[in-house]
Amino acid sequence: MKAIVASVILIIICGGLAGVAAWAFIAWMGLAGPVGALVAAAAGMVIAVAAFAGTTTLLRGAGWMK
C-alpha cells in the first residue's frame, strides 16, 4: 500500500513539474495557440514519464520504495 501511495504522490509531483517545464519550453520557443498547446502537451508527457521513471528507479535503488 505504501508503494501505491508513493507512486500517486510521485505522479502528481512529476506531472506538475513537467507542466511547468513544458510551459517554460514553449515560452522560450515563442510558441502560442494550438501549436504551442500541442508542443507543450507532448513535451510535458515526455518530461513527466522521464522524471517518474528516474525518480522511482532512484527510490527503489535506495530501498525507500518496493
Image (cartoon, rainbow, N blue to C red):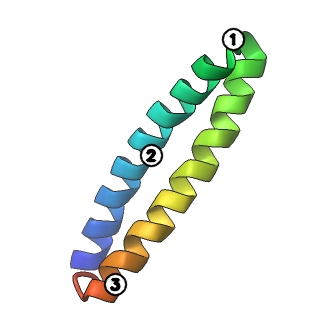
Residue 1 showing in the rendered view: no
**Residue at 35% in and 67% down:** 7
**Residue at 36% in and 49% down:** 12
Residue at the extreme front: 28
Q: Residue 32 carries which label?
A: 1
Side of 24 relative to 46 (left or right): left
Residue under numbered circle 2: 15
Residue flagged by tag 1: what amino acid is it? Ala
Say what secondary structure mark 2 lies in: helix
Relative vertical location of residue 50 with respect to residue 65 in this rendering, above or below: above
Q: Distance between the residues labelled 3 and 1?
A: 39 Å
Residue flagged by tag 3: what amino acid is it? Arg
**Residue at 40% in and 56% down:** 11
**Sequence-earlier tag: 3 or 1:** 1
Say what secondary structure mark 3 lies in: helix
Say what secondary structure mark 1 lies in: loop
Q: Which mark is residue 8?
A: none
Residue 8 percent across, percent down from the top left? 34, 60
Relative vertical location of residue 50 with respect to residue 25 in this rendering, above or below: below
Q: Residue 60 carries which label?
A: 3
Side of 14 relative to 22 (left or right): left
Contact, CB < 8 Å: mark 3 with mark 2?
A: no
Q: Distance between the residues labelled 3 and 2?
A: 20 Å
Relative vertical location of residue 36 with respect to residue 42 in this rendering, above or below: above
Residues 24 and 38: in front is 24
Q: Tell me the quarter of the image containing the N terminus.
A: bottom left
Residue 41 showing in the rendered view: yes
Side of 51 relative to 55 (left or right): right
**Residue at 41% in and 51% down:** 14
Residue flagged by tag 2: what amino acid is it? Gly
Q: Dot 2, how many residues are within 10 Å of its Cα: few (below 14), some (14-19), or many (20+)?
A: some
**Sequence-earlier tag: 2 or 1:** 2
